[in-house]
Image (cartoon, rainbow, N blue to C red):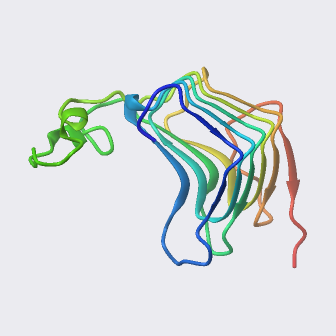
Amino acid sequence: ILGYGNVIRNNKFSRHGSKADCEGLLFEWDLSDNNLVTGNRFTDVMSGIDFQGGDGNRIQNNVIYASSETSRGGVELGSYDNRTTWPCNDWNITNSLNQYFPYLSKPHNCHSQNNVIRNNTISGFRVGVLMYPITDSSNVIMDNTITTAVIQPPVLFAFNFEVTLAPDN
């Protein structure tokens, strides 16, 4: 998603058995702020919702189920504090014929802040909610029901959450 103030509601996202490494939704840079993602169903995805920058987004009341082979997170909140490495350095693009060049031709703020991830059901991922490589306390992660795919302590950077570990099969 590259855009401000969008509402993504009551959709179904799935790879439909494909082996492609697909996320359900991808938020990129400072071009993805103040969006609402609610009431959606994500199935058979490698990661349900992936941030690579984006502020003020609300992710709520979604159901996110992993594909069987994923080792990623249900919601991945990538937050970066510099503009010299990927994904923040895409402004260093040389192809001015690219339709997105006017948007990509400047450095971007890839620090994800003030996002709310609340009341989602996340199941089957190695990690329910992952913030990397840096965390930011302005992001609120609460009231999610998370069932991990493996029996190990989930790596969650959150508070006020419920975790249910899947039975050992």
Image quadrant holding the C terminus, namely bottom right
Question: Looking at the image, which residue is at 47% across and 27% down?
Answer: 4
Position of residue 131 in the picture relative to residue 39 (left or right): left
- Total marks shown come to 0
Tell which of 122 and 156 is nearer to you. Answer: 122
The residue lying at 59 percent from left, 57 percent from top is: 47
- Above or below: residue 95 compared with residue 158: below
Residue 117, image x and y in percent? 69, 34
Residue drawn 48% across and 73% down?
20
Name the residue nearer the viewer: 134 or 118. 118
| 34 shown above or below 105 | above
Image quarter of residue 89 = top left
**What's the residue at 68%, 54% (across, down)?**
127
- Is 73 in front, or is 61? 61
Q: Is residue 80 left or right of residue 75?
A: left
Tell me which corner region of the image, top left, top right, bottom left or bottom right, holds residue 108: top left
x, y (%) of residue 9?
68, 41
Q: Is residue 6 left or right of residue 40?
A: left
x and y, in percent, of residue 80 in the image: 40, 34
